Image (cartoon, grey):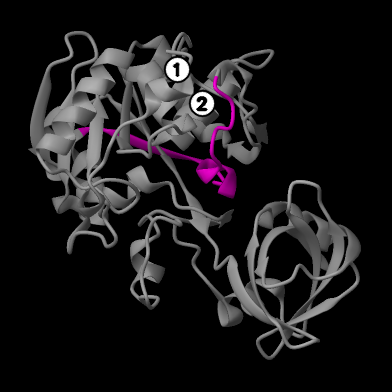
Amino acid sequence: MFSLSDYAYHLPPELIADRPVPERDTSRLLVLDRRSGFLSHHFFTDVTSLFRAGDLLIVNDTRVIPARLHGTKISGGRVEILLLDYVGGCLHLEKNGFFQCSCLMKASKRPAQGSRILIGDRLQARVEELEADGSVILSFHSEAPMPQALLEAGSLPLPPYIERKEEDPEDALHYQTVYARKEGAVAAPTAGLHFTDRLLGHLRSMGVEVQPLTLHVGYGTFAPVRVDDIRSHRMHHERFEIGEETASAILKAKAEKRRVIAVGTTCVRTLEYAAAQEGGLKPGGGSCDLFIYPGFSFRVVDVMLTNFHLPETTLMMLVSAFGGYEHIQNAYKEAIAKRYRFFSYGDAMLMI
């Protein structure tokens, strides 16, 4: 279970969902009993019969920013930019008066340090540093506030496996959860894409408590694992925040032996990282770099809702740690055989 190849599987390309289902909560739902390995097939709206009064549902309220930018070098060459650390850039903006952050850049020739890039009508960037890992540090100057400049010039950074000839304006709606509030992610916490306001309202009326936390999903979530022994992998950092009300609700639920249901790997990592810190889980924020793989002992999460993940990724390792390696292997084989839709816009899986 510690070899990268242990997390490989073959997925027929047609099972990669490049668009969401017409209605969020009509996706399919594969349910795994973690103890027995028993699998059952449902639709997502069936969570109303799978959740129960007293459950605490934790969601990630991060909001995806229009982090993909297209620009032109002063010399005339075209450039594509992906912001990697929007939150860090905002902190730099508050302190220094201009927005600066780490980015990925695609160009026919890598721009030199000090060169300028024109982006739309009111935004330009300057190359400050060229990093050894291939990323660049850019400082942005805009005639408008940076959030407004991004709305005007940027687009949502869909995952690289969603290949389309043209961008779909509907992604601006579909690639956000209905409870997205705090801007900062460059990828959506996709397990939450299945919820509608109506379904959440139904769950609350049943007695399910819903509380948010924030983890700004970074591009590192798509970064490949480059070591054969996964225990040598070093996880990327992502900024998080847990509010006082959420922390209190979690501690109360655990004390009363009520189930804590985490929506997505981002919530799982945030909760388990916070619980492992000195003094245990408490309100506050920081930078989460927790790598969860089989053998991990979960302290907070009792039930996990997630999507189907890419092979040989840290996300596959996390769900294998939670659901059991053999159970997850069987679940993925079953999902492929039953033609479930995979990845960000795909179907869901509930592990109870």
Relative to 125, 272 lies left or right: left
Q: Residue at point 39% right, 25% down?
A: 7
Q: Which residue is mark 2?
A: 271
| Magenta stretch: includes residue 211 | yes
Task: Tell me the magenta residue range.
Answer: 207-228
Q: Position of residue 96 (x, y in %)?
A: 90, 62
Cβ atoms under marks 1 and 2 closer than 8 Å = yes
The amino acid type of the residue labelled 1 equals Val
Q: Which residue is mark 1?
A: 300
Q: Position of residue 250 (x, y in %)?
A: 45, 23
The amino acid type of the residue labelled 2 equals Leu
* Residue 258 seen from this side: no
Does dot 1 land on a helix, a strand or a loop?
Answer: loop
Residue 294 lies in quadrant: top left
Q: Earlier in the sequence, mark 1 or mark 2?
A: 2
Q: Position of residue 275 (x, y in %)?
A: 56, 18
Relative to 252, 92 lies left or right: right
Does dot 2 land on a helix, a strand or a loop?
Answer: helix
Residue 99 lies in quadrant: bottom right
Q: Residue at point 31% right, 32% down?
A: 9
